[in-house]
Image: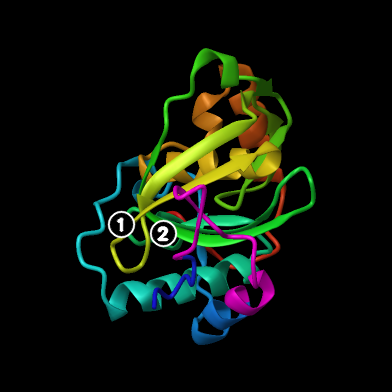
Amino acid sequence: MSQQGTKQRVDDEFIVDTEDCEERERAFRERGTARPITVYGNPVLHKECRDVTVFDEELARLVDDMFASQRAAEGVGLAANQIGVDLKVFVYDCMDDEGVRHVGVVCNPVLEELPADRRVLDDSNEGCLSVPTAYAELARPDYAVARGQDLDGEPIAVRGTGYFARCLQHETDHLYGYLYIDRLSKRDRKDVLKQMAEGTARYETVPND
């Protein structure tokens, strides 16, 4: 059985990531070890990550550590390069706007192109563990579909609305070398970096040389 425990599909297409969330997240996290978070300016965050091509115990251990790191930093999503690992995989433990919890893992994610009638923008605040203590409004579609692979290398599709849709887009961006501040205007980006410089992260980070 997949480590994710999400072989079941909705409508024969989308994984079920809303069942047994507490138990699944705890199992990942308790096997893992929290690692410090890389922050804006670290080279690993600013380039496209390598595809996952081997689905083995080493990948499973990485995912365990990612869940432990995500919980330690009180995040709702975490990409591998945020703990310094150059691989296309992210984890999430995120509520949607209806208060439904989603927990899962996606390897090699690709965001599905949305038809025009599904591109309703939400300009809510966004933050990032790799840009600690800083937030800015950023317009993103309020619906997202990420397609990729699970921990067995099997094809999966994950869909989200509202805040969870933002999470799927944010974490996929990370794996292609983009942070949310790269999508801001110059003025807003400058403000976010100022917020980051003036704040103190509440979790362990990797100092930039």
Q: Which mark is residue 86?
A: 1
Direction top: furthest residue: 116
The answer to which of marks 2 and 1 sits earlier in the sequence is 2
Secondary structure under tag 1 reads loop
Secondary structure under tag 2 reads helix
Tell me how many marks there are: 2
Query: Which amino acid type is marked by label 1?
Result: Asp
Q: Quadrant of residue 68?
A: bottom right
Given contact means CB atoms under 8 Å apart, are the residues at marks 2 and 1 in contact?
yes
Residue 14 drawn in magenta? yes
| Magenta highlight range | 7-25
Residue 167 drawn in magenta? no
Direction left: furthest residue: 53
- The answer to whether 56 appears left or right of 95 in the picture is left
Please say whether residue 129 is visible from this viewpoint.
yes
Q: If the image is split into quadrants, where does the C terminus sit?
A: bottom left
Q: Quadrant of residue 17?
A: bottom right
Tell me where residue 96 appears, x and y as whole percent. 71, 47
Tell me where residue 141 appears, x and y as whole percent. 60, 26
Q: Which mark is residue 80?
A: 2
Query: Which amino acid type is marked by label 2?
Result: Ala
Tell me where residue 99 appears, x and y as whole percent. 79, 51
